[in-house]
Amino acid sequence: VYVTAFVAGPIVIMIMILSQNLAGQSDLAGWMPLITLGIPAGAMMMIGILYTLLPAENLQISRQERGDREHLDVPEPGGEVDPRLIKALKARNRALRMTKALKQPFRRYISNYDWSLVLAMLCGGGATALLLLGYFDEWFPMYTLEVGLCIIVCVSFFPVMIAYEGRRWYVSNVERQMPEFLRELADMKDIGMTLQAAIHRIANTKLGLLSSELQITSEEIRRGVSIGNALVRMEERIGLVSVKRAISLVVKASEITDHLRETLMVAISDFEHYLKMKRERFNSAFTYVAVVYLSFGVYLYTALELNTRFVASFTAFNVSLDIAGNVADMFHIAIVLGASSGIMAGQLSANSILSGFKHTIVFLIATVVVFIVFIGGGGV
């Protein structure tokens, strides 16, 4: 359905535009608003169908403050409580939160989309101001409005894309390292080491992102925190549902028995099955994303050939053609098709519109390059 409606359809429209221009007619011009509105409307309908049919990829990062001793309990003012003490405690809490955010700015950025949305509005507003002030007229004298719109969309999507892809990278790395951590824990328990000693030993190994969390957990155990509370605090710092499920299983089992071999093997098997299903989904989705890229590439290549070599072939017959109208119409369709196709590629790959932002940026940049650099707007 996608290839037929969103690839073959626009290519047919391009050929109709060019053929009517050659015939001296322009009946299709009145249909352009319906075409540019119909493509995103159809894409949104397909995205809605995909959202209903496909399971969403879980990238939720929830960091709870329960059990976090870095924050201080602030009592409600009343009785003989000094208000200045309450104010000082609240200020201390704010300072601690700020310090924690400054120590791990990237993790704070990807754990909450609020920062990326604010940055996206600032970037989009800045690009819009440059367009309204006329700077784009100097930089892009040809199709200024179209190029400006593409740049505004790209710079607005970019901060959110970084947050989403950073979160996806963080989730993938931590989840990939969890089975190795659990397997090393099971091996050390087999040779008679205590759970505390095993965590101390594993914390010094290279497990990537998970090593830093294990080092914090190991240090907390040395300071007297119980093994259960230390592991619970680690799962809350990581904030992934899959990690919480595995760690909670280990914590509950350690409270009942010291023989954790079977429990750890169950957790490892469950986690590896979960990772296997994610890989299978990625492999399946890659084919569909490749089709989207190939389809949009076919559209751009067809537009390039029609407006360069095909039109240039008429010079042998001493025919002068003004293709500016053709290029403008095809440019508008390419912008709408690129934005819609990018979002659809993200929906196919991860069932998330945010996953499509990177594809939309790539498509819009390719559109600007093809129509401004290679095609241009002059006549033949």
Image: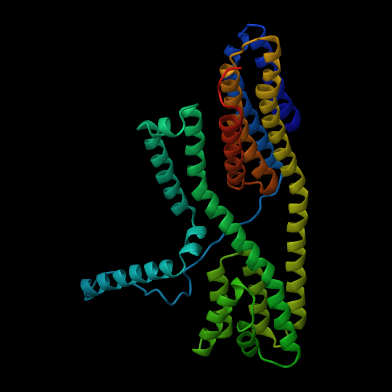
| Residue under the point 45% across and 46% down | 120
| Residue under the point 53% across and 62% down | 62
Residue 151, horizontal then vertical, whole percent:
49, 38
| Depicted 60 relative to depicted 295: above or below | below
**Quarter in which the N terminus is drawn:** top right
On the question of residue 28 being in view, the answer is yes
Residue 287, horizontal then vertical, whole percent:
77, 45
**Which residue, as the protein is rendered here, is positioned at the far top?**
24
Q: Which of 128 and 279 is in front in this view?
A: 128
On the question of residue 259 being in view, the answer is no
**Quarter in which the C terminus is drawn:** top right
Residue 370, horizontal then vertical, whole percent:
61, 33
Number of numbered discs visible in the structure rendering = 0
Q: Nearer the viewer, residue 231 or 109?
A: 109
Q: Quadrant of residue 102?
A: bottom left
Q: Nearer the viewer, residue 348 or 265?
A: 348
Q: In which quarter of the image is residue 271?
A: bottom right
| Residue under the point 32% across and 72% down | 92
Side of 28 relative to 142 (left or right):
right
| Residue under the point 49% across and 57% down | 112
| Depicted 302 relative to depicted 19: above or below | below
**Which residue, as the protein is rendered here, is positioned at the far bottom?**
192
Q: Which colour scheme is used?
A: rainbow
Side of 68 relative to 263 (left or right):
left
Residue 286, horizontal then vertical, whole percent:
74, 48
